[in-house]
Amino acid sequence: MTREEIMELLPHREPMLLVDGTAPEADGWSRGWFRIPDDPWFCRGHFPGNPIVPGVILCEIMAQSCCELMKPVLKDHLVLYRGLDKVKFRGIVKPGDLCEISCHLDEVKTSLYLCSATLSVGGKCCAQAQISLALTPKE
């Protein structure tokens, strides 16, 4: 999906839309990507002179990238975080980096989607998490 197609499914807008594109893969997998801007708002105080993307932003990038896995149900539903488990940060992500996200749909329990995601830069794993996402009907 292009950024425009993602905006048709997700309510996020600038500056909180943190996925540039997604693509389906085989067997419940998808991939997403996001280029960190050169001067993102979330790095201005984290840390001056040595900007590093905060871990919570990496989690948001992974969660938004999972939208490809949920594409069939998103037109009629809003997706919300339900939980994050087994979050690990393994490398530093800087402004200008291209984040590549690999997502897997592990399980669906009624309106709860359980996904695994890994965020890499240049082939190096920088973050990973198990993400629980809940669907709620759009009002």
Image (cartoon, grey):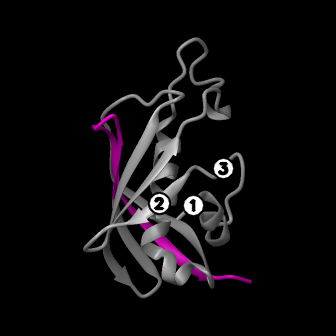
CA separation, marks 1 and 2?
7 Å
Element class at badge 1: loop
Q: Give the range drawn in magenta.
A: 117-139
- Per the rendering, the mark at residue 45 is none
Q: Mark 3 points at which residue?
A: 16
Instruction: Please say if the residues under marks 1 and 2 sit with CB atoms less than 8 Å apart.
Output: no
Q: Which amino acid does label 2 sit on?
A: Thr
* Quadrant where the image shows the C terminus: bottom right
Instruction: Kindly identify the amino acid type of the residue bearing the numbered disc 1.
Output: Thr
Residue drawn 72% across the image and 49% down it: 14
Going by the picture, which residue comes out furthest to the bottom?
110
The answer to which of 70 and 60 lies nearer the viewer is 70
Q: Is the C-beta separation of discs 2 and 3 under 8 Å?
A: no
Front one among 21 and 53 = 21
**Which residue is labeled 2 in the image?**
22
Which element carries disc 2, helix, strand or loop? strand
Which image quarter: residue 89? top left
Answer left or right for 43 relative to 89.
right
Q: Which of marks 2 and 3 is nearer the N terminus?
A: 3
Q: Give the mark, 3 or 1, whose residue is nearer the N terminus.
A: 1
What numbered label is drawn on residue 2?
1
Q: In this view, does 122 lie above or below 106?
A: above
Q: Which amino acid does label 3 sit on?
A: Met
- Residue 136: x, y in percent? 60, 81
Quote the CA–CA distance across marks 3 and 1.
16 Å
